[in-house]
Image (tube, rainbow, N blue to C red):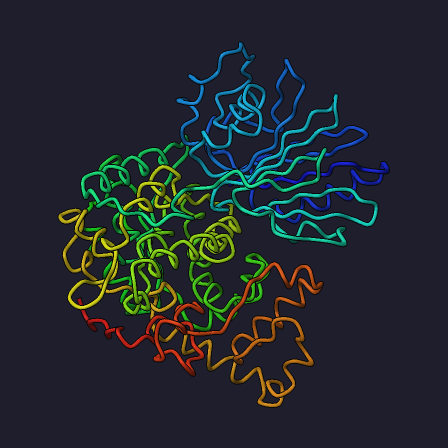
Amino acid sequence: MCGIIGLFGIKDETQRGKTLKMASKIRHRGPDESGIYSDNYSILIHERLSIVDVHHGAQPLYDTTKQRILIANGEIYDHQKLKTLLTKPHQWQTKSDCEILLYLYDEFGPQFLEKIDGIFAFAIYDPRTKEYFIARDHMGIVPLYIGWDDQGTTHIASEMKALKYCTSIKEFPPGHYFLGSTQEFIQWYKPKWAVEHPTIPVSLKQLRDELEISVRKQLMSDVPYGVLISGGLDSSLIASIAAKVRPGLHSFSIGLEGSPDVKFARIVAKHIGSKHHEFTFTAQQGIDALHDVIYHLETYDVTTIRASTPMYLMARKIKSLGIKMILSGEGADEIFGGYLYFHMAPSTKEFHDETVRKLMKLSKYDCLRANKSMAAWGIEIRVPFLGKDFLDYAMSFDPQDKMCGGDKPEKYVLRKAFEGYIPESVLWRQKEQFSDGVGYGWIDSLKEYAEKMVTDQMMVDVKQRFPIQSPDTKEAYLYRSIFEDKYPTEDEILTVEVGPSIACSSPTAYRWSKLFEGMADPSGRAVKVHEQPVESV
């Protein structure tokens, strides 16, 4: 995962120095190499984390025929297949997976985005016409922000912290592109499943085949890589498939001493034969890291920070072992209705609509957490469940096949499709949110710390202190205080979407069941159907 900075419509020569300062704010994302292009209208900077074509894939990349320039953050998994779509001769400069973007744009225009299976945020600039084209992947797996300064110069950056000279800032919307000539955001990703109610029955074989294809695509790498194993269903399935492609690959888990996730991850690692690395952390280590975590994550969402902190601590350990790319299991809960409140869905339509809603918010939550926690230490993370081709199939069959309740656990159809891939004790293990599974003492310690740091009077005066999106718990107040110390403007505050702090952080749960009334904790274990885990394995 790399970092990109782009300025378009610059008005004075001092902008170059400012842009270099902006780039220094995201260099953690691309510690291997820096590249820059500038003219009297635009400045493009790329901070590179080299994963594919390590020796020749430096950016900015140039279309030597059309003179266009590209900076890109991400991976184009089907770039070799996409080459077969080209009809014109092109002077290839590298074996990079990203160079294809220049030539697809040249031949197909903005519509080429619909042909890609990958994760990306990129800009293409034409110095002859001064036109620029900015785009972000279908789900916002790769972060991107856009802003404007008081002179009207357009800025883009992989992380909000780099937009320090902007007077207006917003998240670049997932599945959209932006043309400089029109100054408009255009939605390019419009899946049918987002507006239609699927009715086709599931094929367990196709579901299994599509996920295996997605994992194999995303193992594209010229550097050492590994897998995360939380000990839950989703990451364990990804690890199991990856281990078939590369036996003996590295796997990683983290938790408090004696945490349920670490125990179950150990079982999975032994089953798939990975070179497993267990990391433990203390609650105090996590609390000590909160300021850094919130700085890197650029959020004050309670659930995200709870889960990001152990992931952030683990990323540093992974980096120290020389691993530069990781596969993880994000997205499965949103696709298959894996959160425990889905047990209370009143109909298949409500169930499906909620999965769609959750997916469309991932750029602010799980995708943000996974990407920025790892990128803070120069590691790229990939999420096969959100591969565009797999996602389009997994969201296209009848949600009745995903419904849970009674003797059917959440994500039943996914479990059935992969029977035999991982041990039964993990295959049928109940959902645990990452922040719970690393050890229940983690969340309890955060609450205790917040209780010490935030007084009752502070909560009485909360709307005076935070009139915008006022926090409703002491823990939320604590995170908001840290966030605003680093990101104080209203625009920065509003890049974070918050709702009532209920179980699993879903306002839909209120409509589905009165059991959630009065709950003020987004932990999955607050849901009535949650079962306490086995103490020992």
Image vertical order of residue 405 relative to residue 397, above or below = below
Residue in the picture at 21% in, 56% down: 412
Residue in the picture at 63% in, 42% down: 185
Provide residue 117's location: percent of width, then percent of height: 42, 34
> In the current view of this chain or complex, which residue is farthest to the right?
12
Q: Is residue 260 left or right of residue 15?
A: left
Provide residue 520's location: percent of width, then percent of height: 45, 79
Count of marks overlaid on the render: 0
Q: Is residue 335 left or right of residue 419?
A: right
Residue in the picture at 77% in, 44% down: 18
Q: Nearer the viewer, residue 364 or 509?
A: 509
Q: Is residue 154 left or right of residue 84?
A: right
Q: Quadrant of residue 481?
A: bottom right
Give the position of the C terminus as an image quadrant: bottom left
Image vertical order of residue 28 relative to residue 232, above or below = above
Q: Nearer the viewer, residue 191 or 330?
A: 191
Image vertical order of residue 469 relative to residue 279, above or below = below
> In the current view of this chain or complex, which residue is farthest to the top?
89
Provide residue 204's location: percent of width, then percent of height: 19, 44
Provide residue 181's location: percent of width, then percent of height: 72, 33
